[in-house]
Structures are given as C-alpha cells and as structure tokens.
C-alpha cells in the first residue's frame, strides 16, 4: 500500500504504446482507479489501440488491479485493438493462474516479444 | 492480540496494513509469506470498507492481529449486514471469468493457510504460518 503504485510511464515502440508500472504495488483501489483512468485515456488516443503493459517493477497486486485490467481489456476489444502483458514475475503470474486470467490475457516473457506480437 | 479500530476508509486501511506488515517483517517472515499476507490483508480490508460497510465512512473497521515468529493471525471485522461466503460465485467459472470483481475471497483462500468467516459474515480470520 505505497503511494508510488500510482505511477505509469508510457513510451512508443514500433507504433505500440508501452505502459510501464513504475511502483512495486498495484494494490489499493484509489491508485488503481487513477491508473485505470490513465490507461483508458491512452487507448482512446490511438485507433485501434495497440498497448503493452510492462509489469517489470510490480511486486504486489490485488484483485482490484485484476478488475482494472479486465475492464481495460474489454475497452481495447471494443475498439478492435490489441492488449498484451509482459515481464510478469512468477509470484504475480501465479495470481493470474489461480484466477485463470492467464487464459484471457496474452502474456509474454519480455517486452520485445509482446510488442512484436501486435499486428 | 493487538487491536486497531479505524474509520471505514481506504486511507485508514493503509495505515493498518503498514502496521501489520511492519510486525510481519519484524518477525522475519519469508518473502512468500509476506507476499501472501500483504495480498490477503489488502483483500480483507477492501472487502470490509467497500462491501461490508458499503463505503459508509461513519462505520468502523476493527483489525486484531497477533504475529509471532511461527504464525500470523489477523481478524478483520466490519459493521455491515454480513454475508454468506458460500453464496459468492466462483470467479473462475466461464461465465464469471471476465467479471471485473469477485476474486478477493478466492485469493485470500489461495494464499493463506486458513480463512474463516464468523457466523455473522462480518468478520474474517486469516492465518498464515511462517514456513
């Protein structure tokens, strides 16, 4: 439950927006709502949205974060876009497996592969 | 057992979580156990504030905890109407998989050694062994 959880840095890579979570925690709802707004704003700027979420720095995340990601995925789909997740450390990946969300998100080990997978 | 009573708001919940986690670190819990406790506590506190007390800031959340080198016990109690945990839909069922909410209890159960709700459904007891 740290404040730095709210920060996201975005860069462009081969026509794909890469959003990198800069804090170790995506836990509490206040910051998750802020991140959701920031990412939603990002996908409305690009048609179709082409977005990679980089979890390199993320050490903890909650079910509210999973909810935010699901909502984001639906919005990307509505706009016929592409969303990929990458660089998820094993402990966090286990959360996706337990909740079976690894089946609905496209998850890559590294950023380059995630970017390259987007048509 | 240490006891903290806080207003039902996420900002106050953060203070409690930091206090509990400081105690967990003081007893040198493994990184895996810290991860589990941090996640389960976040879920329990969010449930209490958001669902139990339904965002009513005039209500309170009580957190009791006892942490030693072998075992962490945390009890989170809200002042809401209570609920029956057996009635919470399975979030991994196909029809619920893309629902943005409903995974908190499942994650608590997955990561803690024991998760029990009292009869009123207002109080959850989390236990984690320091393996």
Image (cartoon, coloured by chain):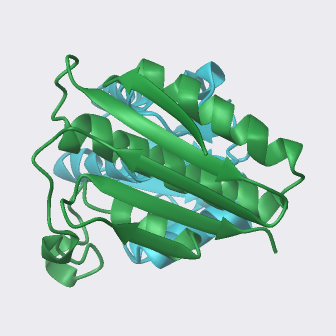
Chain colours: A cyan, B green
Residue B11: x and y in percent read 44, 19
Give above or below for A34 relative to A67.
above
Q: Which residue: 70% across, 48% down?
A: A59
Residue A46: x and y in percent read 34, 31
Q: Which residue: 14% across, 60% down?
A: B83
> Does the image show residue A90?
yes
Would residue B32 appear left or right of B13 to someone viewing this image?
A: right
Residue A102: x and y in percent read 47, 73
Q: Residue furthest front?
A: B1
> Does the image show residue A110?
no
| Number of on-image labels | 0
Q: Which residue: 9% across, 47% down?
A: B81
- Residue A100, quarter of the rendered image: bottom left
Would residue A5 appear left or right of A80 to someone viewing this image?
A: right
Would residue B131 appear left or right of A46 to someone viewing this image?
A: right
- Residue A114, quarter of the rendered image: bottom right
Q: Residue furthest bottom?
A: B93
Which of these two is toward me, B97 or B129? B129
Q: Which residue: 23% across, 78% down?
A: B90
Give above or below for B53 relative to B56.
below
Which of these two is toward me, A10 or A1? A1
Is the C terminus of chain B in the top left, top right, bottom left or bottom right quadrant?
bottom right
Which of these two is toward me, A60 or B118? B118
Would residue B67 appear left or right of B110 to someone viewing this image?
A: right
Residue A66: x and y in percent read 40, 53
């Amino acid at each position: 439950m740290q404040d730095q959880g709210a920060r996201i840095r975005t860069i462009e890579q081969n026509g794909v927006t890469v959003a990198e979570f800069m804090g170790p925690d995506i836990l509490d709802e206040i910051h998750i709502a802020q991140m959701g707004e920031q990412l939603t704003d990002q996908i409305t700027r690009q048609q179709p949205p082409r977005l990679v979420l980089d979890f390199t720095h993320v050490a903890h995340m909650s079910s509210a974060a999973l909810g935010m990601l699901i909502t984001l995925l639906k919005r990307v789909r509505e706009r016929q876009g592409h969303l990929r997740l990458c660089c998820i450390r094993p402990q966090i990946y286990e959360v996706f497996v337990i909740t079976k969300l690894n089946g609905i998100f496209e998850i890559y080990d590294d950023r380059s592969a995630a970017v390259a997978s987007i048509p | 057992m240490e006891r903290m009573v806080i207003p039902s708001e996420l900002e106050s919940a953060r203070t409690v979580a930091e206090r509990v986690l400081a105690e967990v670190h003081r007893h040198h819990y493994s990184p895996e156990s810290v991860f589990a406790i941090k996640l389960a506590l976040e879920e329990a506190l969010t449930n209490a504030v958001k669902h139990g007390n339904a965002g009513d800031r005039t209500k309170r959340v009580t957190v009791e905890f006892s942490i030693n080198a072998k075992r962490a016990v945390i009890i989170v109690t809200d002042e809401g109407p209570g609920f029956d945990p057996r009635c919470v839909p399975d979030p991994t069922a196909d029809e619920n998989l893309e629902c943005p909410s409903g995974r908190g209890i499942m994650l608590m159960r997955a990561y803690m050694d024991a998760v029990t709700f009292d009869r009123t459904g207002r109080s959850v007891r989390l236990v984690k062994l320091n393996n």
